[in-house]
Amino acid sequence: MGAERYIGVAERRARLALRQRLAGQARAGTPEEVADALVALHGTDPATVYLAVGARLADPAKTVEETGRALYEERSLVRMHGMRHTVFVFPTGLTAVVHASTGLAVAARERAALLKHMAAAGAPDAAWLKEVEESALAALARRGQATAAELAQDEPRLREQFVYGAGKSYEGLHTVSTRLLKVLGVEGKVVRGRPLGSWTSSRFRWAVAPEHPELDAAEAQAELLSRWLAACGPATEADLKWWTGWRVTDVRRALAACGARSVTLDEGTGYVVEDDVDVVSAPDEPWAALLPGLDPTAMGWQQRDWYLAPELRPLLFDGSGNVGPTVWWNGRVIGGWAQRADGEITWRILDGEGVGREARAAIETEAERLSGWVGTTRITPRFRTPLEKQLATG
């Protein structure tokens, strides 16, 4: 996999604009098209999914209706644990790949940890937990969708509690339902269902996961890496390790298995899928975008200097590395945005290089576009950043 050619910042931004569905000519028709193009949408904050989709639809007016349809009626999109033990929204056809490539290893650790913590607290053993699990899954299948509290009506043992970290500074009381449903989610047996409130709500029901075939882990890793490189390549080995959460050996094996080609980047060696070495030209027209906190484009790579200046990070990220709402112009982050208490979408440019009247007009258009479909809904990011807080409070 010797270096084929150099791919510079300008071309990387062109690829981002078109493949991440951000340029006007590349916008999508449905939430499924958005998710397929991005491979995964961050789902930790429920509002992120809708905001990320709306930013990429040619007609965002039906963002809430169509995304809800895909998630909760047709199940063409599924919200489940994935890479780095993080909740994402995936195309349903990709769930088997994600589960085999990433979920199985995490699931084994999660179940072992739960049993260890229960044993340390003198709680019932693995056989008891298995009985409760089977009973809870049967109840969930009968109900279709249910909250943990509703499942506990059918299986009262889910209400059992045990002490976690007794005598430690982090000591706490854990409920079996909370820990067990988390394990079942990582194991691919249950998924998050319809929220209890609006589309921004973090309170949700559970549902039995869609059936999927069991795949070979190595083959699934090669498939997932190939899909991601097609959407986000070129990327460095460090980017790939960070995004997948895999060991370096797994990344390298998957790169070889999917026939990835190496290219030269400013950061060093990068990788693209085998047939993706042709030059990609910039979009036909300049473009602006307002992307939400944890958007998959803003969070897509570990090495971000080619689209986000390091000096902007203190204002745009929280202390744990979560990105807040960002303003984009022609492939780079130039500022951030927020929604005030009265519903107004407000924004600020932090990097004004090359940002003139045309850019400001385009950004204002995007702000109006966002405000138009969000309507009276109030959005507060789960992970708040310095600039978002400043803008939100006016």
Image: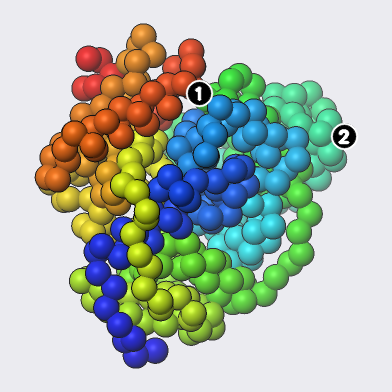
Q: CA distance from mark 1 to mark 2?
A: 36 Å
| 199 left or right of 326 in image | right
Q: What secondary structure is found at the residue carrying circle 1?
A: helix
Query: What residue is drawn where x is 35% and y is 29%?
Result: 365
Residue 140 at least partly seen: yes
**Amino acid found under the numbered disc labelled 1:** Trp
**On screen, 250 above or below 12?**
below
* Disc number placed over residue 142 in the picture, else none: 2
Q: Quadrant of the N terminus?
A: bottom left
Choose top left, top right, bottom left or bottom right for residue 153: top right
Which residue is at 70% across, 34% downward? 69
Dot 2 alpha-carbon crowd within 10 angstroms: few under 14, some 14 to 19, many 20 or more: few
Q: Residue, x 62% and y 47% (percent of image)?
A: 32
- Determine the secondary structure under disc 2: helix
Coordinates of residue 2 in the picture (x, y in percent): 34, 90
Q: Nearer the viewer, residue 330 or 211?
A: 330
Q: Earlier in the sequence, mark 1 or mark 2?
A: 2
Q: Nearer the viewer, residue 195 or 371?
A: 371
Q: In the rendering, at what x and y percent does residue 294 appear?
A: 39, 41
Which amino acid type is shown beneath numbered disc 2? Arg
Instruction: Measuring from the top left, give residue 298's x and y in whole percent.
Output: 35, 48
Which residue is situated farthest in the right direction here? 142
